[in-house]
Image: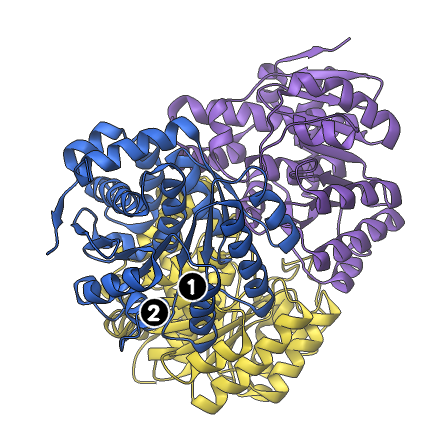
Chain colours: A yellow, B purple, C blue
Amino acid sequence: MLYTPSETAAIVLQKLRDSRPLVLCLTNNVVQNFTANVLLSAGAAPVMLQHAGECEEILNTCTQALLINTGTLTEQQADIMLTAAKAARAAGVPWVLDPVAAGVLRFRTEFCHKLIAEAPPAMIRGNASEIMALAGEKAAGRGVESANSSSQAVKAAVSLAQRTGAAVLVTGAKDYATDGTNTWMLTNGDPIMERVTGMGCSMGALAGACLAVADSALDAAISTAAIMGLVGERAAHKNTHPGSFATAFLDGLDALMPADLASFTRYNAVE
Amino acid sequence: MLYTPSETAAIVLQKLRDSRPLVLCLTNNVVQNFTANVLLSAGAAPVMLQHAGECEEILNTCTQALLINTGTLTEQQADIMLTAAKAARAAGVPWVLDPVAAGVLRFRTEFCHKLIAEAPPAMIRGNASEIMALAGEKAAGRGVESANSSSQAVKAAVSLAQRTGAAVLVTGAKDYATDGTNTWMLTNGDPIMERVTGMGCSMGALAGACLAVADSALDAAISTAAIMGLVGERAAHKNTHPGSFATAFLDGLDALMPADLASFTRYNAVE
Amino acid sequence: MLYTPSETAAIVLQKLRDSRPLVLCLTNNVVQNFTANVLLSAGAAPVMLQHAGECEEILNTCTQALLINTGTLTEQQADIMLTAAKAARAAGVPWVLDPVAAGVLRFRTEFCHKLIAEAPPAMIRGNASEIMALAGEKAAGRGVESANSSSQAVKAAVSLAQRTGAAVLVTGAKDYATDGTNTWMLTNGDPIMERVTGMGCSMGALAGACLAVADSALDAAISTAAIMGLVGERAAHKNTHPGSFATAFLDGLDALMPADLASFTRYNAVE
């Protein structure tokens, strides 16, 4: 690794702004609007589709990354997602798995395992319970929330990365990014981020945008955590309630400069 | 009833904050994001699913209430909703019916009658036209809006409550909560609330959260009306346009204290 | 044409506020909430449905306009949309086609051609690439974005209007409204509008509301461009980031007076 995590995040954000990657988001119905706005504010471009043929077509033409988020999974959507993941792999388009509520609900848990087996993602982003569940550990989620702290999931993240070849980003009060060999803890952020729906899910979409431009999936995971964390904690300074916080978050993401990341990203190597 | 409506609302809000109930929301596509944010700002937790098996699974494990809202009903979604309502009854999880546009459109009207017959809800929340239609009276809705005032629907609400066993909450310029025996009018609120989409629908979700913690469905209905009304009128004081009003509403819901409800809820018993 | 475009827009907004048309929006999942809020802030009323029978029923009773937007098209939704377009024609309800990403993706491009052939719309609103694609010209879209400027699409717009009988509204840095005989350029607006998801899609819904009250589809197209442009540029004056801009846009739409349009709409006839 040539750069520190803070330098990496600054470089990735600059590249993202320069190339404006198009990210195909196959995500849940609750967060589609917020996710699209997060990508636009970050400097990337979103596209959402619900038709397998159209997904294949766009992945073969003008898409730089794919997000698959299992938040409101249906049988039909699972078929589209599997088709899209395979098409992304074939086209060399990197993809991010956001395994919402994996471990809590059987259908989606099995589907996530199937995706990983048949068309492995470049990155997996989840909360502690989701990552632990995918790594085969006993986890304790409640609905879409983690009942484990992110630090409890570090070993599971490393093992999941080693087994799948994906970078793993565990998010929570502290974020951990690992490729199975190197692991970083990033500690920007604010608790209010958990009180706005779609904050985590849009992080998965931003991870896709970062994947499209970063030198490695680990760099993309580090950059995603750094960007969301720094923007979140800055927006929380002046906005202590969730409605105005969400607005300020989009504003702050738009205003974020690469140099801010270079200066204010807090990180530590994890042994 | 040991407490006044204002005391009841204060107690219910405190319990909601203490226990943070998880509410499964099977609701329309237009309002999913706002509904999730209303639950989070109130202090509850949302989960949205679109798969019958996952609904049954979560209702049998970690869910404290269920909302069914017919706003963008499909045949497929109706099947999932009926399965969920039955699973909720079997699991002892209380559920709220929000019969959007019942009386205006045949498919959903018949479906609401079927739900009430086969898996009766603990609460029904609707505007005047919807409640009158479900009670078998002639109503005059236009799309998702009521063409009747809430006061015109009081008799229908009482009769619907008596027939179904559900508490009924009729919302409008004035709100009425009844269990068929006792009926209360609650008069907080502001007309701007009708100019933000999802304000009524998210009220149904909040009703679910209140049901999860209240001593009775009538207490939950009273508390729902009191919370939405007080937060709405306060947010409207300084925000006279709908964009900033919606943001201020979420902020104000987060800031609301039980003592505010005890002091500022306006109500009257209806003879 | 008796009135200038600025006078026309003022008259149409006043009529819209007076009659509060109900617009049935069959639109994509990403923008449903924002679209509904744009219609409410403008003074119209939204309804969203996902069931063919319910669409027919509401078009035959209380609906003044229909929007069809192909953003997240599925096979099933295409069937519902075709049914709705035919029902609208039969009931004399004018409808707007918003052919999102036509020309980029085959399934929806063919579907748009089919809609135009079998149940022609009163207006087509699209970006330059979409309009050029529907007119049979070579276009260069990327996902949901245009890679052509709106001025490049003027000839295509005129030819599409002549062939289909619909008014065509091409939106971009400059907007062009044509009925195939008369063409107007409207130049209010601000680049930040492209950084908020749903701004273009909600323009299609507003076009429906304008169609419901305007004397001609060209008047409706002119008014739609004038309203969105003036509100957008005003909101951008004090809000330079997309989160607060979106909120200010809804506020400004609510505050907009017909006299503002009469005074501040910028337009030119196109020869």
Which residue is at a point 60% across and 62% down the rendered structure image?
Answer: A149
Residue matched to label 1: C116
Pointer 2 chain:
C
Spot occupied by residue B54 in the image (x, y as percentages of width and height): 74, 63
Parent chain of label 1? C
Q: Answer above or below: position of B271 versus A38.
A: above
Question: Which of the 4 image quarters holds residue C227?
Answer: top left
Asked which secondary structure carries label 2, the reply is: helix
Q: Amino acid at mark 2?
A: Leu
* Amino acid of disc 1: Ile
Identify the residue position indicated by label 2 in the image.
Answer: C134
SS class of the residue under badge 1?
A: helix
Does residue A178 appear in this view? no
Residue B220 image offset from top left, x and y in percent: 73, 30
Q: Earlier in the sequence, mark 2 or mark 1?
A: 1
Q: Residues within 10 Å of mark 2 (few under 14, many from 20)?
A: many
Cβ–Cβ under 8 Å for marks 2 and 1: yes
At horizontal 79% and vertical 29% (from top left) the residue drawn is B136
- Who is closer to the viewer here, C19 or B198? C19
- Nearest the viewer among C220 and A242 is C220
Q: Taking C38 as reference, is A133 above or below it?
A: below
| Mark 2 or mark 1, whichever is nearer to me | 1
**Spot occupied by residue B259 in the image (x, y as percentages of width and height):** 60, 21
Is residue C69 left or right of A3 when viewed as pictured?
right
Residue C209 visible, this orientation: yes
Q: Position of residue A215 (x, y in %)?
A: 34, 84
